[in-house]
Amino acid sequence: MSENKQNNQKKQKQKQKQNHNTKKQRRKKAGTQKTKQQSKVTFSADKLTEFSIWYENILEYADIVDKRYPIKGMPVFKPYGCFMQTKTMDLIEKEWESQDIDRVKFPTMIPETFLNKEQDHIKGFGSQCFWVTHGGLDELNVRLALRPTSETAMYSMFSLWIRSHNDLPLRVYQTCDVFRYETKQTRPLIRVREIPFNEVHTVHSSVEDALQNLEDAWKGYYKVINDQLGIYGLRLRRPDWDKFAGAEHTDVLDSVMPSGKVLQAVGAHYLGQKFAKPFDIKFTNKDMKEELGYMTCYGVSSRLLATVIGVHGDNKGLNLPSTVARYHVVIVPILARKSKVPHEDLLSKAEELSKTLQSAGIRCKIDNRQLRPGEKYYFWEMKGVPIRLELGQYDYQKNEVRRVLRINSEKVQHPLDNIVELLQKDLKFVDETLNKRALEFHNSRVTNCSTIEEMQEAIKKGGFARIPYYSVGMDGKEGDKKVHELTGGEVRGTLVGEEPPEEGTLCLITNKPAKVYAYVARSY
Amino acid sequence: MSENKQNNQKKQKQKQKQNHNTKKQRRKKAGTQKTKQQSKVTFSADKLTEFSIWYENILEYADIVDKRYPIKGMPVFKPYGCFMQTKTMDLIEKEWESQDIDRVKFPTMIPETFLNKEQDHIKGFGSQCFWVTHGGLDELNVRLALRPTSETAMYSMFSLWIRSHNDLPLRVYQTCDVFRYETKQTRPLIRVREIPFNEVHTVHSSVEDALQNLEDAWKGYYKVINDQLGIYGLRLRRPDWDKFAGAEHTDVLDSVMPSGKVLQAVGAHYLGQKFAKPFDIKFTNKDMKEELGYMTCYGVSSRLLATVIGVHGDNKGLNLPSTVARYHVVIVPILARKSKVPHEDLLSKAEELSKTLQSAGIRCKIDNRQLRPGEKYYFWEMKGVPIRLELGQYDYQKNEVRRVLRINSEKVQHPLDNIVELLQKDLKFVDETLNKRALEFHNSRVTNCSTIEEMQEAIKKGGFARIPYYSVGMDGKEGDKKVHELTGGEVRGTLVGEEPPEEGTLCLITNKPAKVYAYVARSY
């Protein structure tokens, strides 16, 4: 071998090594690490300490969204993620239908003239709209906004639909996308420019009816969010300086994410007559007098799914409650090289099992890819499938299956004779366990604070700091700046239904008399 | 009575009469007539001879859409119509899911640069787009189109998702809205500017797979459209001059509407490699060589619902198959003034009955408005509810209910003991009858023509004229102009699977040798 050739080879090797190092470094940065087997990806990002990386990774690896669509903040929902997003909205829709709220479908675009009708509203949303200015080659006479929310679209029609108190209450919902020209950093499901949205809008003949309707709405949200999705949060009434644009008051569900920052998962607004007036939503009341309607609106977005992903997941990946899981069960046939049971028998047994489960409403997938079982296990754990069923030769012979739970890796043998019943029980256990863990996590992230140091410590730990505070009216806005300086967080509001502090309690921030307990947190 | 007073009264009466006449005239023009009872509206528009008026009326009276939204061609779906539209799409979605086609969700906007990638496509759609040019106060660098259809949005991502033949077939669907800046006259559900849409897009590793996939798609469409919605049409292959922009060939389902004009209810396209090339959708085939994917796409819109409404309806109003009906059954308690059975007993029996039906999956509504029974009957007939149940005192005493079918006014007594079973049978009969009628109507509207006069007569009667024709290649376009002059219609295509004419047959239009049978019709 000539010296020249030898040198070349050395250089090549060095170059390869450099490449390798760079790739390794890049992976570390991205929070992942490829092991020897090409196809096995494990997370090196820890969910609690590096949540942001964990979150971005899981969205990519589990095929939830693809961020590479060429418009900023508008990722594509891939099949696996689309299923979960659709299911989440389905749960909400079913709840509204059980409450006799009717589905409607309004146009995506709103004429600028309509958007401008309510002053606070346009102040809040005007600068966030995408504007359609041309149709084909024509310039439009009036610019059209892609709805940033649907109040102004709907309310222009409500005024045509409502004549008398007999037409009330009017309660409609729609599942649609809303659009915001976000200038802040976008983050899939959490802060996007096209937002999957479910919104309810109602008109009532009295304040009492409207407020009662909001309570019913909250019951529905708790049912879906706590009971069905297994996540928790605080129902806070936002400070006056942080209300929905055009609302009399705004209640939200703020959920603590593993990062310690809170995410608003629900927004529910009492609009009073603020929109009824500019949109001329009048009814003839029982005394035959004209009166303006009393209105409410409330909605949830893809943030609900973000919370499900964030709260239930762990360092292996997703952890899905049965309500939104694309598959409840993955069946992995173990096709050993020297199997005493022919592979085709194992595979047809798997097929048979799958059909049994499907017809019982258990969503099921057989993984017969040409990969080693261990790789499949890692893969489906990452995807958060609640139950894995391993079907090997000995299981086959005993007419059993090996059942492994995603939440705790518990392994047992399940006889196939009453497999549906056993798996339904398993799924119930999974949902209950995730629910319990989430509630424990939530409770551990609400800290009662009586000193500034405690507050700072609580915010550092993550979640809410509960502090005595002087006011959440506009006069309290000044204190919020101080809160931000001290913690990086903000006053998120007061807990709905909570008693005020005892007389003589002083505001932690200003030393003025404290009128409320405020909940402070950093937020998305 | 003074003369003056008398005169005044006369004048008032005259004025009232004038008003009355004017109102009457206006109603006649709008195709409706109010009878003595204020609330009873009957159609004076005949469905077959004045379909256009009938259609617009029924959309309004039955609360399907509200056209008064302030943007042209963008009506609001009201609850009753939204339910039907949603159900129609649900049927299609369920079919795709049974075919293992995955749901995805792509952004609404497409950068202009992407839309421009396929030349025929942009020629076809470029002038029809709504353009977003501003986000907030910023002018965007690249204009964004509201998707006129989703090929260019999806295919930019497909190229990232596909590497090898193992990734194929890729088959995804979405239910979304597409947007077209229509300059022609708009008509709700049929020609609108925001179109409710369900679309499938697929990539395959061979021509055969792609074409087979289209056949599977048609099986799915027939199942939903023929079997579940009870409507019919011809699967025509469009002439080359009338293909989807960017397709190798386009098959459609053209349905005859009561007006005699045909409506394209399905479009299914073989794209070959025409999009794969500009969007770089390549895969490594089994011989480890790179190859461009073979693609198909197909979709349906709210036109499907328009066909259901148009074909099944009659002069009393809607006539709905059970698959899309908001209510299967309306219960009308007959609260006679001298009823031997207390009203509250009748009402609670109705409640009980309603619950029984609901829990058996029969969608049910109790009408206890303060109106006379006859008015309620007219109302729900107009709304197309398949079954009416009247519950009067004598029915109550015999533990029965009077059942009336919307399709034929047939009245029988149903014992309440096995009411669910009986109604399920009724609903099946309703669906079968509507289906049979629709098929008969369809068959009566396809006319075999061997002279120009016959063709003209057939088009005048409505539906398709089948004629021997020289070519549906680009060389046949000239003849289409002649067809239009002669009939007001156009060559809609050839029937897929039909044998060509016998040798020696001459084209009805040009006297050249006829290569195909062409189907001529006027269209929406």
Image: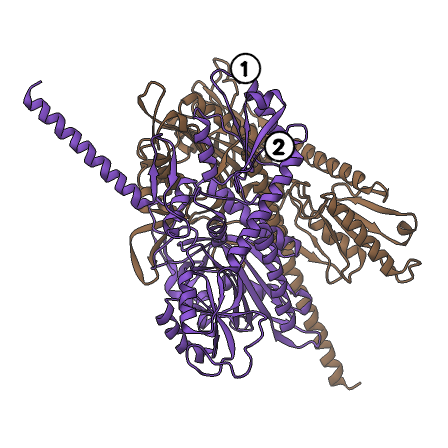
Chain colours: A purple, B brown
Which residue does the numbered mark 2 point to in the structure image? A357
Q: Quadrant of residue B204?
A: top left
Q: Residues within 10 Å of mark 2 (few under 14, many from 20)?
A: many
Percent position of residue A495, x then y? 54, 69
Which residue does the numbered mark 1 point to in the structure image? A340
Circle nearer the viewer, 1 or 2 = 1
Q: Is residue B274 visible?
A: yes
The disc labelled 2 sits on which kind of residue?
A: Leu
Q: Earlier in the sequence, mark 1 or mark 2?
A: 1
The disc labelled 1 sits on which kind of residue?
A: Lys
* Mark carried by residue B69: none
**Residue positioned 65% across, 54% down in the render:** B61
**Residue positioned 74% across, 59% down in the render:** B35
Is B293 situated above or below A341? below
Tally the marks.
Answer: 2
Q: Quadrant of residue B40?
A: bottom right
| Front residue of A116 and B69 | A116
Chain letter of disc 2 in the image: A
Q: Is residue B148 visible?
A: no
Q: Residues within 10 Å of mark 1 (few under 14, many from 20)?
A: few
Local secondary structure at mark 1: loop
